[in-house]
Each structure stands twice: as structure tokens, then as C-alpha cells.
Amino acid sequence: AQRVTQPEKLLSVFKGAPVELKCNYSYSGSPELFWYVQYSRQRLQLLLRHISRESIKGFTADLNKGETSFHLKKPFAQEEDSAMYYCALNYGGSQGNLIFGKGTKLSVKP
Amino acid sequence: KAGVTQTPRYLIKTRGQQVTLSCSPISGHRSVSWYQQTPGQGLQFLFEYFSETQRNKGNFPGRFSGRQFSNSRSEMNVSTLELGDSALYLCASSTGAGGFTYNSPLHFGNGTRLTVT
């Protein structure tokens, strides 16, 4: 069965420090991978997708099929990055069926 | 474009009652999906509707049902409520064309927080 694992429930870093939020998935095919973010009192929103290979708000994520990972990285964390981050997988069954990890709460301290 | 709209924002119900939640997708989006979010289980997929047909269903009991109307608006119903149904219910919409999202990722609403007492 498809599964997404985010090993860290909470990640706390200081402003300016590098950040890496880990995401591992189990699926033998070619999935779509996403990172969604939920800021305090805001709706869940897409941060980035592996197919677009772009940097959003300084964050990047590379799909590593060999390690089945899709880690989210940012070289210099900002206080406004504090939020819940969810990794999600779409295996192509249907657009609306995403499998989410349980999320990592990122706290960036001043 | 207006975002995904869910009503009501909050609901308090008693065990055994039933509840209906509503979702209006982004204009032009034909797929509506529902998710249950709890602290213990995280985000879990309930079902997806596309063109008024249920296209996919998660692993939830039959007490959870939904429907979609011709204008793509969707409702979700939970019958015989249990305490464990207390959760944030999220609705998401997308264009719905195909299995992969490509240029149409999911857009989420603010959710309906259901409390069962």
C-alpha cells in the first residue's frame, strides 16, 4: 500500500539556520509528490510539486526515486516559515486522492 | 477566483445525530474531494466526486456518504454520529481531468470543525 512518512513531528531551528524536512514514501510506480503548508489560522495550501522543479519562498525539494524521498530544504530559515508542513503523494488513481504524511511542525526561533 | 468555500465553519452535534457539510469548489473545478483531519490520524481521504459520480473512496464506514450536484457543489453526510467523528473536515477541488494533477493541484477550503458530544 502507498504510504508517506514524515519522521519528525516537530522541528525547531533558529532564524538563518538551514532547514530540512524529511519525507519518505512507499510506492513502486511513478507518483506525484507535493509539499503542502498550513500557516496559523490559514487553509492548507500547496507549497511546491516535484514536477515543477521550482523554488517557492526559498524552499526546494528533489524527488529521489532511489531513496524514495522528497525532502524539503531551505538554506536560511525565516520566522515566517513557522508552520505545519505536509508531504503528500498522488499515485495517479484520481486527482483528489492524495496520501498525506502526518506533518512536521516547523518552529523558527528568532 | 473565489477559493473553495465550506459551510458551516463549526458544528456541534450529539452522538447518534446526523450532519451535512457543504462545499463549493473553485469555479470551473469539477472534482471535489473530502478529507478528515484529526490529531491522531492526520489527513485521511474520504471520497472524491467528479461530474456527480463518486470516483474514489477511502477506508471509512458507510455512515460517511456524499454527493455532488450538477454545479459541482458537494455535500458530505455523516449519519449516526460517534464521538470519534469529531474532526476537521476539509474539502478540496481540482479540475478533475485525469488521474494526475499536473497543472491542477488540489485547492483546499478552510474546513468545517465538527464536534460530537
Image: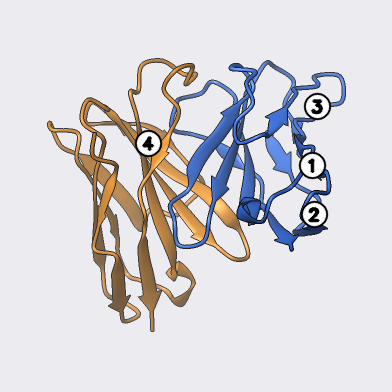
Chain colours: A blue, B orange
Residue type at mark 1 is Lys
**Residue at mark 1:** A22
SS at circle 2? loop
Q: Which mark is residue B48?
A: 4
Q: Are marks 4 and 1 on the same chain?
A: no
Q: Nearer the viewer, mark 4 or mark 1?
A: 1
The x and y percentages for residue B72 are: 19, 34
Label 3 amino acid? Thr
Name the residue rendered at 33%, 23% in the picture: B95
- Toward the viewer: B63 or A30? A30
Residue drawn at x 79%, y 42% is A22
Q: Nearer the viewer, residue B16 or A32?
A: A32
Q: Are marks 1 and 2 in contact (CB under 8 Å)?
A: yes
Marks 2/3 in contact by CB < 8 Å: the verdict is: no
Q: Chain of mark 3?
A: A
Rounded to the nearest angstrom, the CA distance separating label 4 from label 1 is: 28 Å
